[in-house]
Amino acid sequence: MTPPHWASGVSAGIHAAGSRDVVYVPDHPLSHVLRELEDRFRDVRRLLATREEEAFGMAAGLYLGGRLPTVMLQSSGLGNSLNALTSLLLPYQIPVLIVVSMRGDAGEWNPAQAPMGRAVRQILDAITVPHATVESADAAADIVRVAGTTAFATHMPGACLLPRRITSAAGLQETRESDPRVGGMRGPTA
Amino acid sequence: MTRLDATRLIVARAGDAPIVASLGHPAYDLFAAGDRPQNFYTWGSMGMASSIGLGLALARPDLRVFVLDGDGSLLMNLGSLATIGLLQPSNLVLVVMDNEEYATTGGQKTPTAYGADLAAAARAMRISLTATVRTALELQTAVDRARPGEGPCVIVAKVQESAPTVKPPLDYVAIKDRFMAGIRTPHSALS
């Protein structure tokens, strides 16, 4: 299966930023990134966490030991992460590249995802974590790489947001098909 | 055995190995037992000590990594046991200072006061080397069993509260920088 262009870019950006450890909580679009890392970047270690805050704790330990860590999560998990971000990574100046697969933005089918999806940027601004949005599949590698190198150089976590219109190009079509009012439950992806 | 007694014993057995301490009383007792560069004192992020230790153990397989957690703290991040069981870091020694209460916040009882068994939880999550200890001798035996390469290991130390009177400094970045230098973290991460 040919990987989506955006996922190849995200994987290449993580690698180019020097990160060889990706701690993640699964998400459907991110599965493409995980597969790309497995296929094309075998030197990147993929580490599953049970919860997003735990992923940030593990990332902090990896950094203390000399690694440049990435945390990959769905935007819904940002809420779970705030305690570790604000009382560990930020005060101790521990950098992490954060790759966020967006839910609740354009194309969302599940209303439960909407409130956090709308709030992600404001929350990151409020806790002073810089963030960039990957506006096109072509730009993914550069935006992720620069977010990572900036985070590691400045000792600050830095986030890249992957909008649903990039990660779910097919998913926007799916949105209508998966709305139970339109018919069928096929295809809603988490 | 008080938590301070147990902490002193761990520090004595750790040699130059890193010790990550959970916030509040475990960190205060680590400072009181012996301040050293290889101590990482957390001042927040309750529950994260075991995860920080796990990440460190994965980054530095050449080091034995000790974590001084609390029962209340581990209960806040119990999924960490599943991740440790999944990843099987053989150099991680997680010591849970189980005083059966939230001592830092006034002594409210934790579920371990009513029989919740954290060593059994660790075993259920595929951490095979576990012990529940009540005396200094039992603790020493358990720590010595957790030789490098033998872990991961979870030791639940049933301790009495030691009412710490000193605290580590609040300079977080200095704690981090000294720690990373103390365990000779490769310079690439300090760019």
Image (spheres, coloured by chain):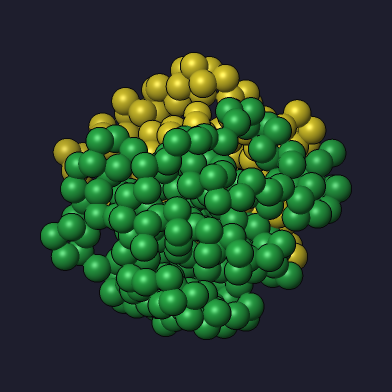
Chain colours: A yellow, B green
**Residue A5 drawn above or below residue B153:** above
Q: Considering only vertical position in the picture, is A116 above or below B178?
A: above
Quarter-of-image position of residue B6: bottom left
Task: Please indicate whether residue B109 sits to the left or right of residue A28 in the image.
Answer: left
Task: Please identify the quadrant where the N terminus of chain A is shown.
Answer: bottom right
Q: Nearer the viewer, residue B186 or B42?
A: B42
What x and y, as percent, mark residue B86?
47, 72
Expressed as whole percent of the image width and height from the top left, the position of residue A135 reads: 62, 28
Q: Is residue B3 visible?
A: yes
The residue that appears at 61% across and 64% down in the rendered structure is B12
Which image quadrant for residue B122?
bottom left
Who's the residue at 60% across and 69% down the image? B13
Taking depth in this image into account, of B183 and A29 the one nearest to the observer is B183
Q: Is residue B133 above or below residue A122?
A: below
Q: Residue at x 42, y 41 (%)?
A: B164
> For this rendering, which residue is in front, B36 or A38?
B36
Q: Residue at image x 33%, y 60%?
A: B159
- The image shows residue B113 at horizontal and vertical percentages of 18, 57
Residue B114 image offset from top left, x and y in percent: 13, 60
Q: Nearer the viewer, residue B105 or B60?
A: B105
Q: Is residue A16 toward the left or the right of residue B118 in the image?
A: right
